[in-house]
Image: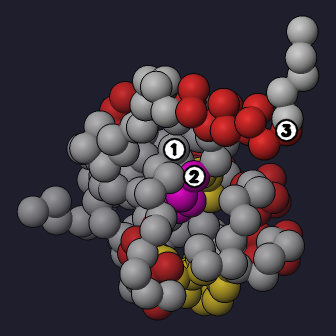
Amino acid sequence: MPVLPQVVRGFAVTFLSMFKKVTTEQYPEEKDKFPPKPRFHGRHQLNRHPDGLEKCVGCELCAWACPADAILVEGADNSEEERFSPGERYGRVYQINYARCILCGLCIEACPTRALTMTNDFELAENSRAKLIYEKQDLLAPLLPGMVAAPHDMVEGTTEQDYYAGNIKGASAPAGVDES
């Protein structure tokens, strides 16, 4: 059997592929067709305690662990008038620059209070670099029923150790807080 020249064989491959079924996915219109896997690392989320206080204590360990230097944390002290977390400190400024973030998850492993986790949200594309810098209000988990937005006092009769042990329930508002 005669051997075809390389050019003819190349054209044959191209010609035959013209008749194969197209496998284009209509991504923006059909988002739910291929959901991400459960362990997928996507956008970060700052978690809250069940009563609404923030879990972040402003220790900056996540920023130190980030190999891309994409996280900026500035801690501040809690006061009796304004309490954002059960500890002595809270993260006053919290920013993640997704133009730099490589979604490696090292910041999640470094967090001692499990304040920072990663969601399955993967749509992080924007049309300007400034929109890729997520501020604290963009990263905070939403308030669930029974939670009250910070600042407010800790649940009456508890200590910060109770919060870190997970002994706080979010069924009612802390003492002295109006839920309206």
Q: Which residues are magenta?
A: 42-47
Helix, strand or loop at label 1? It is loop
Residue type marked 1:
Asn
> Mark 2 sits on what residue?
42
Q: Is residue 5 left or right of residue 99?
A: right
> Would you say 68 lies left or right of 20 here?
right
User: Are dots 1 and 2 in contact, CB under 8 Å?
Assistant: yes
The answer to whether the residue labelled 2 contacts the one labelled 3, judged by CB atoms less than 8 Å apart, is: no
* Residue in the image at 33% along x and 41% along y: 26
The amino acid type found where label 2 is placed reads Gly
Which residue is depicted at the point 37% across and 28% down? Answer: 33
Mark 1 — residue?
Answer: 120
Q: Let me know if residue 178 is in the magenta part.
A: no
Whether residue 163 appears in this view of the structure is: yes
Q: Residue furthest front?
A: 2
1 or 3: mark nearer the eye: 3
How far apart marks 1 and 2 lie (CA) works out to 5 Å
Residue 34 in sight in this render: no
Marks 2/3: CA distance? 45 Å
Q: Quadrant of residue 180?
A: bottom left
Residue under label 3: 6
Residue at image coords 66%, 85%: 72
Residue 77: which quarter of the image?
bottom right
Between 69 and 9, the residue placed more toward the observer is 9
**Sooner in the amino-acid sequence: mark 1 or mark 3:** 3
